[in-house]
Amino acid sequence: MTAAISVSGLVKNFGTTRALDHLDLTVSTGEVHGFLGPNGAGKTTTIRILLGLLRRDAGQISLLGGDPWRDTVSLHRRLAYVPGEVNLWPNLTGGEVIDLLGSLRGGLDRSRRADLLERFALDPTKRCRAYSKGNRQKVALVAAFASDVELYLLDEPTSGLDPLMETVFQDVVLQRRAAGRTVLLSSHILSEVEALCDRVTIVRAGRAAESGTFQQLRHLTRTSVVVETSRPIDGLRELPGVHDVSSDGPRTRFSVDQSALNLVLARLVTLNVRTLVSSPPTLEELFLRHYGEDGKSTATQRGDADLAGVR
Amino acid sequence: MNALTGTAALTRLALRRDRITLPAWILGLATFTAGTTALWADQYRNMADLIQETQLAAANPGIRMLGLASGASVGAYAMIRNFVTLAVLAALMSTFAVLRHTRQSEETGRAELIGAAVVGRHAGLTAALIVAVGANAVLAATLGLAMIVAGQPAAGSLAAGAAVAAVGVAFAGVAAVTTQLTSSSRTASGLAAAVLGVSFLTAGIGNMAGHIDPSGLRVESAWPAWLLPIGWGQQMRPFGGNHWWPLGLAVALFLACTAAAALLAARRDFGQGLLPQHHGHAQASPALRSPLGLAWRLQRGPLLGWAVAMLGFGLVMGGLIGHVEDATGTARDWYIQVGGSDQILNAYRASIMQMAGMAAAIYAVQVLLHMRAEEANGPLEPILATAVSRLRWAASYAVTVSLGATALVLLFATGTGLAAGGVLGDPAEQTSRLIVASLVQLPGILVIGAAVIATVGLVPRFAGVVSWALLLASILIGPMFGPTLNLPQWAQDLSPFTHVPKAPAVAVTTWPVLALITVVAALAVAGLVSLRHRDLALPA
């Protein structure tokens, strides 16, 4: 598979602030790629550089085989974009905006436009000033998905949608993927990312902290274990790879690195296990480890170390 | 909790937000008043000149439309020349202030945040009205002081300030009502502006239809002048009787409007207006589906307003051409100097064409600065994410403005030609010679337009301030005011308007026009190259 987007060592400074600090991002053709990160991590800046709206200070970018700054117009015929904050012209109707943006991109599919309006339950005769945030977002979504393009760049496209519309959005994205299109989805909604994305890149402070499939990312993380043994547990804390041990009567909770799981289980068996619940790490935990203040240093270190392994 | 809880806090908030805007309005109007009054005090030291000018203003229906003569004094003359301008600006200051703190806050969602706090239903409107009325009170005192400083009698000066502020207060009330009617602040200000326009017309018609008293220095207005606020302000007759009771009419209108607004506010939902929302087109017409179509669609409303104004301006100026023939003294000298010919009619034609060119330049700045607004407010981002290059987008604005400015000067020429033809005969001939003269203005207008594009490209964050400053400086040091201000020639030469040939009084020469076009090209290229190569300053 070729890469629809290939970014390496991307640097962007705003004055003295470094917004992107050697960011790497690879999106393969035909995949839905999740782009996760806290506010201010550089997601929107990255997408704007990919669109040629901002200029990079350093790094290599290949977007659909071209350079987003130099080949702006020809590349834009092949992609569609939904901004995070949709600001439209207050005196134009939603329908007019959809047609306008579609025409400027090089045309849209009338039947798909009608279908999308119906599925998103959007009234195209209302003026943009009368739309809520969610409805403005729907205008941008319909305008983007009504065009059959190779790549969709979506910057937190569902932050104002209700759960019903969220489902519609997911269906539309999966249809696009089935048609072999590529989607870069920046998002905060983990269930959405988990449901849609083949691979994710987690960005933090302008750098890619981790990247890979969920399977791969989960391997990098710990399994949570709750265990009840008939003999008291001692010495668990001293085992390598065991973390966050806490006891509640006969029950003990801890988390364990994937690599140390075998060793720990062998030890537990000698203590006569009564019950054992083990749960794989959720995306939330993964996310929190990278975002949370306590996980800050370890996450970054681990992220750097593990990144090589993932690739 | 009653309906006014929180008014004090909201008033403080409004004052904090307006701490620059309102003082700028008030000081600007006061400086203008003091400056022009002092100028006329100097120009009309000779009482005979003043009597002659006042008689002309009282006798001339066109000038009666714009100003009411109340006797021969510098103060009364300043009222003829300035009152309508000051009253319109005071009305706009009040309208914008009220809308800023009511409808605009609702539109942006700020009012929702505030309304959820311990704040009564009418607190927002009340705070807006307190600020607007307070600003007008300060304006009354400041304008009075400005005229006293310019050497006018205290009683008349204070009456003048109060007369202007009376119009301002009345329009604070009008805006309080229009803000209830529609859900957009743009439409609300449009409705208030329509009332202002009708108010201007009724006052003007009342004065035109009035009669001159035996002295020949004072016009007694007919009944239409008493219908609406601008007329009431004029009937206070500053420096010509100083009647204070028409102020009561303005206050009564304000109170009636406030009561009506409170009633209406209680009958509508938050964020909504009382007038129904019209649905628009479900699809874009083919004409809209290009950057040029979009620019035209966004700018056609303002252009239509400008077109009506320029045509009307042309008709009035053309209608006055008969009186110019009889002009003597300073007025005649001024036309001859500005028009560049001692053939007074052609000098007059050339000078009003220059005014039209400068007016069209204001239009150009206003429209081209939308480029910056589109960039900073966000709508530009989705446009440039499609297959539209930055240059094509900028070009759509440049083309719209060039065509719009051309249409405006042509409309002005047509209006002037037709009205002048009505006075002097042969409208077709009158119009055709002015049409050439109007097209000659375009290079000057386009220099200003290209300068705006250059600021948008090079210094986007300061594009507004720099553009308006350049325009104002170009007008002030240009041919209309430069000679009067005794500026050295090199300073006057900095204004593009100085180099516009004074057609039809003077033959059009090629070199100044080519030089202006070269400057247009250089500024536009500098702006566009910079726009192509810089980061866009998009909203966070």
Image (cartoon, rainbow, N blue to C red):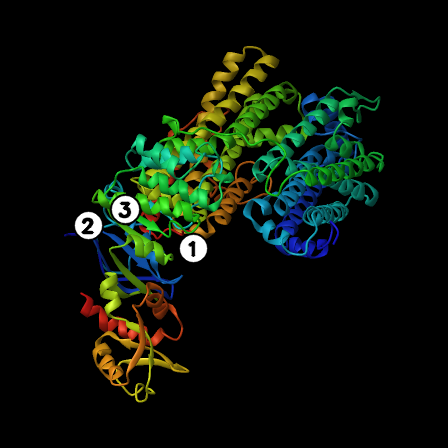
Is B302 on the left or on the right of B454, as rendered?
Answer: right
Q: What kind of residue is marked 1?
A: Ala
In this rendering, position of residue B361 left or right of residue B515? right
Q: Secondary structure at mark 2?
A: loop
Q: Residue furthest left?
A: A1
**Identity of the amino acid at label 3?**
Leu
**Same chain assignment for discs 2 and 3:** yes
Q: Chain of mark 3?
A: A
The mark lying in front, picked from 1 and 2, is 2
**Residue A161, horizontal then vertical, whole percent:** 43, 48
Which residue, given by chain and number where applicable, does mark 1 sit on? B540
Q: What is the number of the mark on residue A174?
A: 3
Provide the residue designation for mark 2. Answer: A29
Identify which residue is drawn at 49% across, 26% down.
B409
- Residue shown at 47%/51% (left/top)? B462
Rendered location of residue B507, percent (x, y): 45, 25
